[in-house]
Image: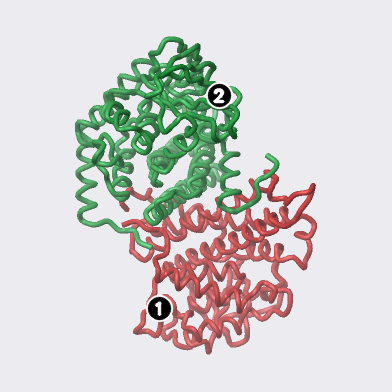
Amino acid sequence: MIDLLPDDEQQALASSFADVLAAEAPLSRLHREVDGDRALIRQLAALGWIGLGIPADKGGLGCGAVEEVLLMREAGRQLVGPGLVATMLAAQLADDGTPFIDGSRQASLSIAAGDGQYLRLDHHPGDASLATGDGLTLIEEHAFSNAIESRGIDDTVALSRATLQVPSGDSEAAERLTLWTAAILVGTAEAARDMAVAYAKVREQFGQPIGAFQAIKHRCADMALRCEAAWTQTCFAALALDGGRDDATFQIAAARLIAGDAALQNSRANIQVHGGIGFTEECDAQLLVRRTQLWLQIGGGTRSHQRALLACPAPGADA
Amino acid sequence: MEYSFTAEDRAFRDEVRTWLHANVPTEKRPSEGPAMRDFDTAWQRRQFEGGWGGIAWPVEYGGRGLSLMHQLIWHEEYAHAGAPPPGCMFVALNHGGPTLMARGSEAQQAFHIPRIIAGDAVWCQGFSEPGAGSDLAGIRMRAVVDGDHLVVNGSKIWSSYADVADWQELLVRTDPDLPRHKGLAWTICDMTLPGITVRPIRTMAGVTTFSEVFYDNVRIPLSDVVGGLTEGWSVAMSTLSFERGTAMIPHQVELQRTIEELIGLAREIPGPDGGKRAIEDDEISARLATVRAEVAAMRAMTYAAISRAARSPVPGPEGAMVSLYFAELFQKVHALALDMLGAGSIERAGESAAWLYRYLDGFKHSIAGGTTEIRRNIIGERVLGLPRGAK
């Protein structure tokens, strides 16, 4: 049986992810105060979603990677802060994930920036942190030294720089982060597509909606095509991970590459479709570009995923 | 979501693999003319005799009526076995036959369908005209009823395999006063009728696989018209509903094989700077990784198309997405191959020859069966709901 569309149960779950995140995390929040979506993450914990992929006997909901990417896609659409991913991974990696699952603790993401330097995203005092690099490592705050506040490409994500020495970490968790990143990038690519299409239907020039012009229509069609490729590949990769298939590493790397390209190209194209308003700070379009650039550096840049993909054996027909 | 194979699926895969291994022709497929026709029809006949003549066709028409899952397995194994393309049998198997099944009379079906499935009849398409390409409804070629015949005058173009075909699916204008999509007839045309002249056209790849066809007072029996004198557009469109999302599978598997071959080649030949292996060149390896990821995504898109087909009886406009993705990926892969081959890419010899041929032939993928511009219009208008308007 091959079915790459959500079944009824998955569809119901996806709808509740979409409904809750659209209501609780509208993009408009990102033009106001920045809090790393900490309150939102606590709300999601109250719904049990932080433990979505954690077995029921460990306090989670016992779902798989497929359900996780359904959540991440919606998180990507609403530009939910990286603390969500960090906290969910911390819940999976910690010896006792309970404080993360129940929302009493959160984690930040720390990205290796070379020479023992790390860039911490949305780190708050007392948070745990997930250090990316050679695998993923869950660390406590005292492991950092020389922490200084900095400014990121994305003003809606707090950035600090710190020094850290970590041993090589968990490569399975790193793979899961890559898959989730792909799903988040798909959500952002879809948000860009939807924003551009909605605008192209109402903005009129030369006496007609600009979406009637092929120059705009074809740009939008390309955005839709990239979303379709990225989302179907991400689902296929999630199935590979859940099924313990040999080609899971290959499929996940492919998903991350395709989704990264989709988010980057779509978020840029969305600004162009919007014209002058797209260049302003008040327009949401710029948020998608900044956030995409950020996610493209989480869990390894595009080049490292290209190398990983080429190092894999070719997937077989019935793999 | 699911991706799993039952024991029965695996047994079926073994059966298919075994049959293909024993039966796939080993000799090289001729690229044009009567030799190509003989090769393609013989291969179809052999598949028919093995019970594989029409895997998607209903059993009542001599087909196998396979489930979507088994069709997928067949196509995957077919491509992995290096089996030849349907070639000049394509139009008969994928257009003529299915259209007759959907809209043909009992007599039309009884005559043509057994011949098609057995590889005894080659069909070509007569849709495009010099003045009607992307704008297919702009067909002008006239057909006038005279007694119990249609009298046809004019010309058709880009008719693949017309030089070796027995029959043609022909779209003609029967009533120029009706709206553009209304006054058309879809008729079977016997290619041996007096007044038909076929002029083969050489493609940029150097072969004559398509033709211009001229009609000088060609008299087609009215009994060969399918679905009524003004129903041609809807008859032509009915073929599309036969396609259940599986059409792109052979292309996807074949392209995946091509990319793996290219990666293998990159491990052997020197890079563009003449020093290290091509795979160690940063630009080449980045491009190889990109196309490898993209063909993986094309596989996932194809599976999604099959999943949609399993849920809905009417194919949606999403089909345009996979074919658009394929066309651009195919061209990207072969452009990369030529860049990789360096100086070897200008010599039609040895390893380069096949890459060069496919590079040149590949330009058709963004034109034939709807240009990529038309496919983008379909996605924009029918998937995204953007307004129709200035073209």
**Label 2's element?**
loop
Residue A259 horizontal side relative to residue B168, left or right: right
Q: Residue A67, image x and y in percent?
A: 43, 70
Q: Nearer the viewer, residue A157 or B34?
A: B34
Is circle 2 on the same chain as circle 1?
Answer: no
Chain letter behind tag 2: B
Q: Residue at x 55, y 79 (%)?
A: A129
Residue B276 appears in the picture as rendered = yes
| Image position of A133 with respect to B232: above or below | below
Task: Give residue A38's position: percent from left, percent from top.
Answer: 61, 82
For the colour green, the matching chain is: B
Question: Can you tell which mark lies on residue A21?
Answer: none
Residues B202 and B290: in front is: B202
- Chain with red colouring: A
Instruction: Say which residue label 1 marks.
Output: A54
Residue at image coords 63%, 71%? A119
Which chain does the residue under circle 1 lie in? A
Where is residue A159 shown, x and y percent of the image? 67, 74
Q: Amino acid at mark 1?
A: Ile
Q: Which residue is mark 2?
A: B129
Image point (48%, 46%), residue name: B319
Say whether residue A297 is visible: no
Q: Is residue A113 left or right of residue B40?
A: right
Residue positioned 51% across, 32% down in the render: B368
Q: Quadrant of the N terminus of chain B?
A: bottom left
